[in-house]
Image (spheres, grey):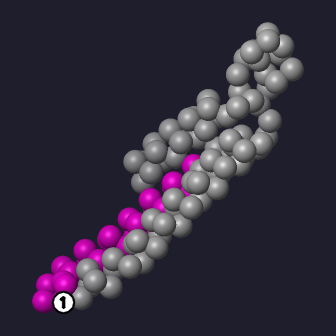
C-alpha cells in the first residue's frame, strides 16, 4: 500500500509541476498566468487516485491468486490463467485513466 501511495504522490507532484499554468512567470514576464487553475489540480488528484486504485486492485488479485495456489497447487495453471485477463483489463483501465488526466492538463 505504501508503494502505491508513493507512486500516487509522485504522479500528483509531476502533474502539478508540469501543468501549463504553473509557471511563476509567463514568457513575456507577465504574472497573469502564474496561479495554476483547478483543472491541473483536479487532473493531478485524479491521476493519483487512479494509481492508488490500480495498485490496490492488482494487490488484491495477486493475494487471492497466491492464496488459491497455496491451497491447491495442482490448480496453479488454471488459477494463473483465470487471473491474467482481469489483471490486464485493470491495467488498461488505469492507463486510460492516466491518459485522460494528462489530456485534461495539456489540452486546455
Q: Residue 59: x percent and y percent?
A: 38, 65
Question: Most extreme residue toward the right, as rendered?
Answer: 32
Query: Where, quadrant-wise, is the N terminus in this rendering?
Result: bottom left
Residue at horizontal 14 percent and vertical 84 percent from the top:
73
Q: Is residue 65 above or below residue 7?
A: below
The answer to if 76 sits in the magenta stretch is yes
Can residue 100 be seen here? The reply is yes
- The image position of residue 75, as x and y in percent, is 18, 89
Residue 35 located left or right of residue 94: right
Label count reads 1
33 with respect to 90 (left or right): right
Res 49 seen here: no
Query: Against 53, is 106 above or below?
Result: above
| Location of mark 1 (residue) | 75
Q: Is residue 54 above or below residue 37?
A: below
Q: Residue furthest left?
A: 74
Would you say residue 10 sits in the magenta stretch? no
Residue depicted at x 19% and y 85%: 77
- Image height check: is 70 above or below 23? below
Residue stretch in magenta:
48-77
Q: Does residue 68 appear to the left or right of 74 in the view shown? A: right
- In front: 88, or 27? 27
Q: Position of residue 47 (x, y in %)?
A: 59, 50
> Could you tell me residue 95's position as x and y percent?
51, 59
> For this rendering, which residue is in front, 57 or 89?
89
Q: Main secondary structure of the magenta part?
A: helix
Amino acid at each position: 500500500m505504501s508503494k502505491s501511495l508513493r507512486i500516487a504522490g509522485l504522479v500528483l507532484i509531476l502533474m502539478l509541476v508540469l501543468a501549463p499554468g504553473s509557471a511563476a512567470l509567463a514568457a513575456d514576464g507577465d504574472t497573469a498566468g502564474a496561479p495554476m487553475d483547478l483543472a491541473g489540480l483536479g487532473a493531478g488528484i485524479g491521476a493519483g487516485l487512479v494509481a492508488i486504485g490500480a495498485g490496490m486492485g492488482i494487490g488484491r488479485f495477486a493475494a487471492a491468486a497466491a492464496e488459491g495456489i497455496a491451497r491447491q497447487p495442482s490448480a496453479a495453471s488454471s488459477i494463473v490463467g483465470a487471473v491474467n485477463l482481469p489483471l490486464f483489463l485493470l491495467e488498461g483501465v488505469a492507463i486510460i485513466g492516466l491518459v485522460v488526466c494528462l489530456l485534461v492538463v495539456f489540452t486546455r
